[in-house]
Image (cartoon, helix red, strand yellow):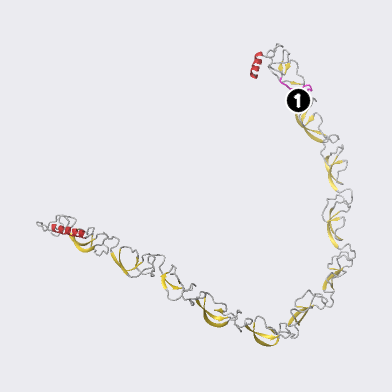
Amino acid sequence: MGTNGRTWLALTLAMATLAGCADGDSPEQDSDRDGVVDALDCAPGDGTRWRFLAGHVDADLDGVGAGPSLQSCVGQRLPAGLSPQGDDCAPADASRWRVLTGLYRDVDNDGATGEGPVSECGGDTLVGYRMEAGLTDCDDHDPRVAEVALAWPDLDSDGVGSDEPVSHCAGRRPPPGHVAVGGDCAPDDLLRAHWLTYTHRDADRDGYTVPEAGRLCGLDRLPEGYSRSANGLDCDDTNAARWMERTVYADTDGDGFGSGEPQTLCMGRTAPSGYALDAEDCAPEDRTTWQWRAYAHRDADGDGDTVPEQGVLCSGTQLPQGYAQWPTRNDCDDRDASRMVSWSVFPDTDGDGSGAGARQTVCAGRSMPQGFSAVDTDCDAVDASRWQDLAYAHRDADRDGFTQPEAGTLCTGATLPAGYATLPRGNDCDDADQSVHTTLQAWTDADGDGVGEGDAVALCTDGTVPAPWSAQGTDCAVEDAARWRQVAYAHVDRDADGHTQPEAGTLCTGASLPAPYFTQATGNDCDDTDAARYRRVVLYPDVDGDGVGTSPRTTPCIGAQTPLGFSLKGYDVDDSDTSIQEDPEDDLMLELILD
């Protein structure tokens, strides 16, 4: 609200005050009945106002006024536009009314703040400020950066700067010609930038170091020959061929093994010529032998088999022939190279490979000694064709190729002889007769037609049933050789006219059914008792004998010829006149239909 508005409001309040003090009112009178007598009521005619309250003009209606305090006639509270508070720091801005102190500016709201503390007019919320200081913001208008970083001039462009640094926002590129890392120990040398410390040197580059501390200007790693850790202790860092002190012995014969008093030399991996690392040369003047080797077995005859014997021998890389640490079999005679194996055998008198008698121990070569065997199973020590007991379960005494059960053992050779078997072949019904071997059932065939009858009997045969017996027992006519089986029939022709009628049954016969019995039908005989009649035909009476009859029709049983007085045709329109058979009108109608 401007100056004119505030002036108008003051005049209005003053006039209302004067109106309440008009002459002639009773001191106890309450005209507006607001509970305050007119003498004390600042607005006796207005029941909503009765007292003076001080207030400040609140032009932006934010609840806090500004300017001088004014007395106003009001009721319960000050009206809108007035406020008991008069310290509004922004009278025309309803969003700000109070002065906040101890603030820190954060325009980009990134948590980092500018200089402070400062005071600012604000409202319920802080926008662009914080109550507490954050990290110093290098650019308060860019939320992506905040932290202040240093950058150094990089004259040689090796990524490491020197001299006085300048400030810039971290996260942004350093200023041109500057880098984020300082401390360049050689500002004008692109190949050197950092001070690198070392504690050991390897001047001869043999991989072994000596203690030496210092520093040198370089890049990211120490150059070859410098190290921060020890690797051995070089006894001569001026000679790459020597780096360690070792105890050696004089090697007179040059076999790699020395003897005598120990000496200490600075050397490499191998001892120098004339010296050796080992001092156990058992023959200092012989380069082919230099060490004591123990042996536990001997092979005096050189056959490859050893005997136990312990000792030590001055030798070279290995024991000489005839001496060994580990056994090779066990020589039964180490004085004879042809004998080395101790055989546990049995005498084989007949030379069939199987022995008999008491076990004997024989020292011989690597093959079974002649006249002996590793087994004592010979069942006939004097017959070379027989040496083992073989079991059999069947016999064929008559040698007809058929066996019968019989178990036992037989002293024989590689296989059982003929007449003995482990598996059956048939079941010989008479093993004493070579002509018979198989039991068959048979029936008496009295009429000799090949089919018998009666009770079956078991015959021992050569595989076929002999006469007068038969392998079948179903003869239906025992005394008639022409008949022996029951055959079913389904049709008969009793009048022998060549036409059958249905009739089922069985008949005892021979190879085929006799007449009048048949399995297949021939026609359908309507009278099988009369050979002249065998078929039923539809006939019409033909009274005038002109060959064409008329109704009524009949179906008599007849033979090959049509009987007199009947015709196969039934369309005679006048059966009393031989000249008339058809109706002309019918003929005309037929012609019309055909046209």
Residue lying at the far left in this picture: please name it: 24
What SS does tag 1 mark? Answer: loop
Q: Which residues are magenta?
A: 529-538
Q: Is residue 345 above or below residue 91?
A: below
Residue 549, given in percent of the width and then of the height, sits at: 71, 16
- 198 with respect to 139 (left or right): right
Residue at the far right: name it.
Answer: 382
| Image spot of residue 181 (x, y percent) | 46, 73
Quadrant for the N terminus in the image? bottom left
- Res 36 → quadrant: bottom left
For disc 1, the marked residue is: 525
From the viewer's side, name the closer residue of 168 and 282: 168
Q: Place residue 532 in its image quadrant.
A: top right
Residue 175 screen position, x and y as percent: 43, 69
Q: Amino acid at mark 1?
A: Asp
**Residue 432 appears left or right of 570:** right
Q: Residue at x 52, y 79 (%)?
A: 216
Q: Is residue 341 visible?
A: yes
Which residue ends up furthest to the bottom in the rendered image?
Answer: 261
360 above or below 592?
below
Q: Is residue 299 magenta?
A: no
Q: Quadrant of the C terminus?
A: top right
Quadrant in the picture for residue 9:
bottom left
* Nearest the eye: 552 or 264: 264
For the point 71% across and 20% down, the residue is 538
Which residue is nearer to you in this view: 289 or 213? Answer: 213
Say whether residue 101 is visible: no
